[in-house]
Image (spheres, helix red, strand yellow):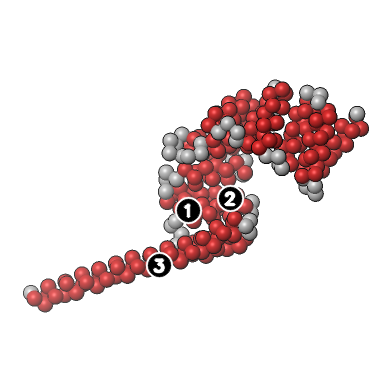
Amino acid sequence: MAVRKWQIMTCLIIAFSLIACAGRDLAVNKKRARAYQEMGEAYMMQKSYTMALREFLRAELIYEQDPYLQINLGLAFMAKKEYEKAISHFQYALELKPDFSPARNNLGAAYMENENWNDAIECFVAVKNDLLYETPHFPLTNIGFVYYQNGDYNKSISSYKEALELMPEFPKALHGLGLAFMKTERYDEAVKTLEKAVKKMPKETRLHLDMGNAYRSIHEYDKAYKSFKQAAVLGKGTQWGEVAEENARDLWLVD
C-alpha cells in the first residue's frame, strides 16, 4: 500500500512539473513572439510593409493565438493588397476574441476593398452598435462609402451626417458627404462641405480635384481652375494629378 501511495505521489509530482514547464515555455514563446510583433509594428510605421509582414509571420510561427498579431497580419496583407489573406486573418482574430470590434472594423474594410459590399456593411453596423467602441464615426463613414458605391446616395448622406454628428470636422466624412451631395445635385451644399474638408486636408490631391468639380458645377470657373491646378501640383506624376491637369487645361481652353 505504501509503495502504491509513493507511486501516485511520484506521478502527481511529474504531472505538476510538466504543467509548470509547459506554462513557462508558453510564456517564453509569447514573449519571443511579442518581440517579433513589435519589430513588425515599427516597420509598419515606416511603411516597410514587406519587412513588417516578415516579422509578423515569424511571430505567428512561434505563437499564433494572439488576436492582436492576427490584426497586424491582416493590416500588413491589406497594405500589400492581398485582401483575401487579410480577411482570413481578421476572421481568425474574431475567432480568438469574438467581441473584438477593431478586428471586425478592419474585416469590414478588407471586405470593402474586395468589393464585398454586403459583408462590409454587416461588419460596420455591428461595430457602430458596439457601445464600447471609442470611434464609431469610422464605421459610420465606411457605411456611407459603401452606400455611395452602391448608388444609394440618400443613405450615404444619412450615414455621413451621423458620423459628423459624432466628429463634426472628420475630413473623410466631409469629403464623402460632399461627393454624395454632388451625386444628388445639391451642388451648393457640396461646395460648402468640400471647402470644410479642404481646410482639414489641404494636401489631399483627390480632394482638390473633387473641389474643382464642385466649383465647376456652380459655374465658379476661376475657383475651379485654381483647385484643379492645386491638385495637379500635389499629385504630380500620379493618375489623379494628370486628371486634374487635364481638367484645368479644359477650363483654360473654354475660357
* Placement of the N terminus among the 4 image quadrants: bottom left
Tag 2 residue: 84
For the point 78% across and 32% down, which residue is it? Answer: 212
Task: Give the mark nearest the N terminus, 2 or 1.
Answer: 1
Q: Secondary structure at mark 2?
A: helix
User: Mark 3 or mark 2, which is nearer to you?
Assistant: 3
Q: Are marks 2 and 1 in contact (CB under 8 Å)?
A: no
Q: Is residue 244 visible?
A: no
Q: Label 1 to label 3, Cα distance in Å?
A: 18 Å
- Amino acid type at mark 3: Val
List the single residue furthest toward the left: 1
For the point 80% across and 42% down, which residue is it? Answer: 232
- Amino acid type at mark 1: Tyr
Which mark, by number, is residue 136? none
User: Mark 2 or mark 1, which is nearer to you?
Assistant: 1
Q: Label 2 to label 1, Cα distance in Å?
A: 18 Å
Which mark, by number, is residue 68? 1
Tag 3 residue: 28
User: 10 Å neighbourhood of mark 2: few (<14), some, or many (≥20)?
Assistant: some
Task: Give the mark nearest the N terminus, 1 or 3.
Answer: 3
Using the image, determine if residue 123 lies above or below residue 216: below
For the point 42% across and 51% down, which residue is it? Answer: 96
Task: Give the mark nearest the N terminus, 3 or 2.
Answer: 3
Q: Secondary structure at mark 3?
A: helix
- Amino acid type at mark 2: Glu
